[in-house]
Image (tube, rainbow, N blue to C red):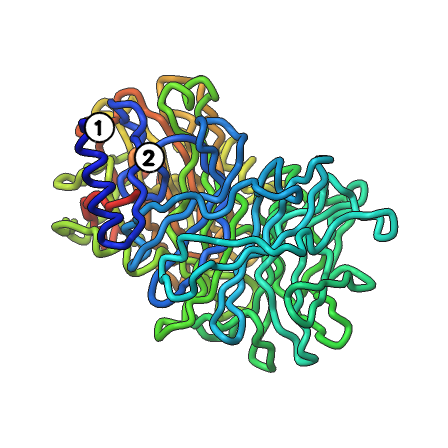
Amino acid sequence: MAASSKCLLLFISLLLGHGVLQPEAAADNQPYRTSYHFQPPKNWMNDPNGPMLYKGIYHLFFQYNPKGAVWGNIVWGHSTSTDLVNWTPHEAAIYPSQPSDINGCWSGSSTILPEGRPVILYTGIDPNNHQVQNLAMPKNLSDPFLREWVKSQDNPLMAPNSHNKINSSSFRDPTTGWLGRDGYWRVIIGSKINQKGLAILYKSKNFVHWEEAKKPLYSSKKSGMWECPDFYPVLIKSPLGIDTSIDGPNTKHVLKVSLDDTKHDYYKIGSYNQNKDIFIPDNGPFHKNSGLRYDYGKFYASKTFFEGNSKHRRILWGWVNESSSVEDDIKKGWSGVQAIPRSIWLDNSGKQLVQWPIKEIETLRLKEVNLPKQELKGGSVLEVSGVTAAQADVIITFEITELSKAEVLDPSWTDPQLLCSRKGASVKGGIGPFGLLVLASKGLQEYTAVFYRIFKSHNKYVVLMCSDQSRSSLNHENDETTYGAFVDVDPVHEKLSLRSLIDHSIVESFGGEGKACITARVYPTLATDAEAHLYAFNNGTGNVGITTLSGWSMKKAQIN
């Protein structure tokens, strides 16, 4: 587009009062650029920050480098939406301008105060490269797009010092605030002492003057630095979300931490003791390589927000980084996407969370393709035609009738990712592997396999879900790690469902109706755009039944 046309568009958008930013796009010929996942037109993006709903407008802020496709020069990028699908870009909302953030504006959260006024707490990097916490407020509350933010003259509000002995290089990412029964606001900030991870608790009467509590909300030994903590209530036996400040007999609390050492998001379900200001998990401390995770693939630095309108949802955002080399990222001119926003709630068992893509993403679906109910024999591959396979939404449901052929689960097979690596899609089993081959080339030289495998263990069956990237690309310079998760589904009494959102270089898969989620980044050299194919497959000796298979090509969303 000519420069004069860009100026004209910018003038028109400003004239209309939306303050829309018209950023330049990255390089042409972009087979890996997504069509319905959130990403800026170019450059580096990482953590989602401060998502919220204000005056009917959804806001997403994000860690952004305006100067290149690698991390650095971090500001808060800002986009708005009316539907969480199509997004309009704005100028950076928060950028270095005070001593307390002069070396970077890192992650944080938004809080809606009782009078409906949004505020943001974020980590700034000061002249000494210490991590400190700052406050920003909208300049004009009547502007639903919240295009201008002003910083508190009291910044920094929370800082390491000789008295509190907080680690000045490990003190970041304040949460959304919650209001206690005593009238005090509370937030937690991630930190560590040696290898002990901490959720440092602060309290304030006015959201400006904060005091550190005598002890952290929670801590775990040998878990390393806790980044991007999140703390919120969930209803028991209800998919509805509730405000962050609500606590009662029908609620549990979730503490999520992003473990810097492993780059995975782990969570605990438990109870919040308001009198002692401590979190009590139902099942022990955090560990670096085990426990419940939001997503068992690439998914990090996540953040939830409560949608306080008629929908009453808690919505989860998460950053999905690249699996390509830094050199390739620089060539293509961008790095990082956000996962599709997910509704998140407590499973009826009370033992884990459930996630599902927001309903609005279905507005991008085009003509539906359905396959008839049929048996998928062992060793067979079935193409799903009529779907744009590089840009699709597919849901398949399986029925298992030959469970007697299930392999015996060795008691030492406790790590699902390791088990999926050993028993990938090409390794024939009893019941499984069976599932989908996505972003596949016509001759199957390339494919990403998302599948199930069923094992027999004592008096029950164990369901393993895998996302196998080992044959995703002929370019083996990419990270081709295989991911895995055990899924709490009983194949004797329940059907096995699998949903995959496919978008050129990202595959988000949801097993057991959202009980397990695995996100992968892949960069095929053959299976791109119109050359991509989609298959159902079964590489086990036992047959499995396909009860339903529905697929949709997805329209391109209007994103930034």
Residue 445: quarter of image: top left
In percent of width and height, residue 499 lies at 32, 50
Residue 539: quarter of image: top left
Query: Which residue is at 67% across, 78% downward?
Result: 183
The span from disc 1 to disc 2 (Cα, nearest Å) is 17 Å
Instruction: Tell me: residue 44, above or below residue 310.
Output: above
In percent of width and height, residue 175 lies at 60, 57
Question: Which of these two is toward me, 396 or 180?
Answer: 180
- State the mark number for residue 41: 2
Instruction: Tell me: residue 304, above or below residue 248.
Output: above
* Residue under label 1: 3
Quadrant of image for the C terminus? top left
Category of crowding for the residue at label 2, using alpha-carbon neighbours closer than 10 angstroms: few (below 14), some (14–19), many (at least 20)? some
Query: Which residue is at 66% across, 63% downward?
Result: 208
Query: Which residue is at 52% across, 54% downward?
Result: 150
The answer to whether residue 31 shows anywhere in this view is yes
Left or right: 390, with 242 as reference point:
left
Residue 492: quarter of image: bottom left
In percent of width and height, residue 79 lies at 37, 49
